[in-house]
Amino acid sequence: MKNKKLAVGFLLIFCCIQLFLILFFRRGIFLKPYDEGYWKDRYEHSQYQLPISQRIIGDDGLYAYSGYRLIEGDDPFSINVDKPPAGKYLIGLSILIFDNPAFSGLIFGLGSVVLFFFIAKRLLKHTVTALFVSLLLLLDPMIASQFWISTYDIIQLFFLLLNILLLMQLGKQSEKKSRNINLLIVFIAGISLGIFAEVKPPFILPFLLALEVIYLIRQYSLSLSISLVAGLTLGVFIPYFRYVQLHSLLDFIRVHKFMANFYLQSRLRVHHSAIWQVIFLGKFPHITSGQPLTVSEWWLMWPVAISGSFLSLWLFFKKKLDFFWKLSIFIIMFSLAFYIFIPTYPRYLILILPFAYLVLARIFINLGIKTKKLLSVLVILYGLTNSIFFLPPPVTDSLDVFYYSLSKGYFQDIYKENITNGDSLKMTQEEFRFTALTALRQAEVESMEIQELDKTATRWKKECEVNLLITYRTRNLGKFIEEKTVKLEKLNGQWKVVWDWDILLDSFLPGYSIATNILPGKRGRIVDDKGLILVEDALGSLISVNPDRMHSEKEQEMLEAIYSVSFQSHITLQNAYLENALPNSFVPLATNFIPLTRDKKQLLESFPEVKLEPYYTRLYYSLDPLSVTNTAYKECCTRIYSATNYRGEKGLEKEYDQPLSGQNGGETVLLNEKGERVRTIIRLQKKDGQNITRW
């Protein structure tokens, strides 16, 4: 008994150590108040509102904002419509109570471990082993990572474990009082199963429900199975109470049909071996490209536990085996088989791992005492050591996010998420964004490529320096390159950049401006044997749009008018002026690649949001207007001609590309607040290409 108490004490201490490590290393996430204004802007400019937007919002950000919207009273299917609403409401409740969505992960993560302990104790009939396997679950990086992320998986696991634990509490029905208590327990278990089904699409629900109904009928009575189904029905309905208020019971049924069709008609690529690669290799094939990605949460216990489950598969057919052991094996095997046929992500293991550890513990408990002690010590030391290296946020994660936002010009995200000294800059988020983005647009910088040269950092230092090489590609004057040194500091365990305006452009300061002067160089014209011009560089128009002046009812007509002269698709043009536009500013979208007729020009100018400016462009009279393309950088959403950047793509333009090629001249200079030149950023001599006569 003394040894048992000592073992329990040690295991509880290790559980507390692991929980402390999670809270300590990720404390910055829990200390950050939720900024609904920022996340509203982030969502409205993300891929969920603008299909080709590169301002990506992750699942945790989407789920948190969805939860906030729903807890504020919005229609449950006004956002994140492919997911049921139960998880959204619970994450929203975390924001309402704690002003932070991450607490939902902490609460349901801890709750899942506690429920798992009681399930393990009931099945293993051994407190120390149950506590050990619960510690194993807590040490699992995939489970631990859910403690600070606002996702649905850990919430779904909680309600599944609650359902199973409640069914385990059923007593004998020899007395009326006991029967009534059992009815209540099963009813609550049904509610839990219903909520489980409404957190994420419940592929396993029909089979799980069938097994539980059969179990209740065989072991107890038909009335208990009816109570389970009644509770399930209520559990499914509860998250839709607001939806039914706004719509109807018939719409409640229709929305489930919609969600089912959404997943049945999904065109995401299925990698049939993905789940096995995740478990045994720690690799995950990218959903679209198939390229193997490293699963940072992987640890050795995954292949051990899953292998143990397969070795124990024969137990499923053992008649006298406890129903809940069979249920555990069924959940593991059915889920693994199902994941072979759907697009699968590593976090899908969250529903499997607790049951795999249970089955592994059944094997473990039959080992000799000395072997168990040795394995226990090794696993705990391995788990804690792994946590010490896994839990501190690596500087590379923060840098990757920073590089992406910087290269795309998302300075509002940099201010909110990436820098530590926003307050000392003495400007708001919008002022910071306006200053930085205006400077780049004055310099006509359209693309930034960031190359990391070297960095000085370890997980345990509080400061870090990174040397970068940034290649800026401009619309008209080619590229220029600058070297940077970026400093980072740890703030509440999170790596943040110490912002310096030199990161943006060397010697730049707020209040400075950038002037760009262009001397248009010309790509050569192509003339046929009769002297007719087939294509030439000539004065045309730069077409810009101000989204703040737009009349939405005429937007499609406006897009069609721009498309007809630029040959850039509607969706890309729309993304260009909506994704990252400055307030009340004109966003350059395209130049005309065919001559503007008087009627076409009048049509474009009739839209109050459209502005036409004189601009040298490539005009096609007989050849295909798509014969040239921007080869200097990936011009995602605009099509603005530049003799410097556009080269022959096909036909005669490609055949005679070399002699035809020209380049713009001019310079870009940095000016101080007095308008005095601080430095010349880039200077280029103009060059005209040769004219070609096609005989």
Image: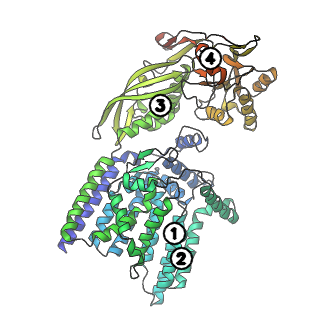
Return the disc, 4 or 3, that comes first in the chain's sequence.
3
- The quarter holding residue 475 reads top right
Mark 4 to mark 3: distance in Å? 37 Å
Return the disc, 3 or 2, that comes first in the chain's sequence.
2
Label 2 Cα neighbours within 10 Å, binned few <14 / some 14-19 / many ≥20: many
Q: Which residue is mark 2?
A: 228
- The quarter holding residue 565 reads top right
Dot 4 and dot 2 residues touching (CB under 8 Å)? no
Mark 3 to mark 1: distance in Å? 45 Å
Dot 3 and dot 2 residues touching (CB under 8 Å)? no
Return the disc, 4 or 2, that comes first in the chain's sequence.
2
Mark 3 to mark 2: distance in Å? 54 Å
- The quarter holding residue 561 reads top right
Of residues 538 and 212, the one nearer the viewer is 538
Q: Which residue is mark 4?
A: 656
Compared across the picture, whether 82 is left or right of 35 comes to: right
Mark 2 to mark 1: distance in Å? 9 Å
Dot 2 and dot 1 residues touching (CB under 8 Å)? yes
- Percent x, y of residue 332: 43, 66
Q: Is residue 604 above or below residue 383?
A: above
Q: Quadrant of the C terminus?
A: top right
Compared across the picture, whether 386 is left or right of 552 comes to: left
Amino acid at the residue labelled 2: Leu
Return the disc, 4 or 1, that comes first in the chain's sequence.
1
Amino acid at the residue labelled 3: Leu
Q: Say the numbered circle drawn on residue 406.
A: 3
Amino acid at the residue labelled 4: Tyr
Mark 4 vs mark 3: in front = 4
SS for callout 4: loop
Q: Say the numbered circle drawn on residue 193.
A: 1
Q: Is residue 350 above or below residue 524?
A: below
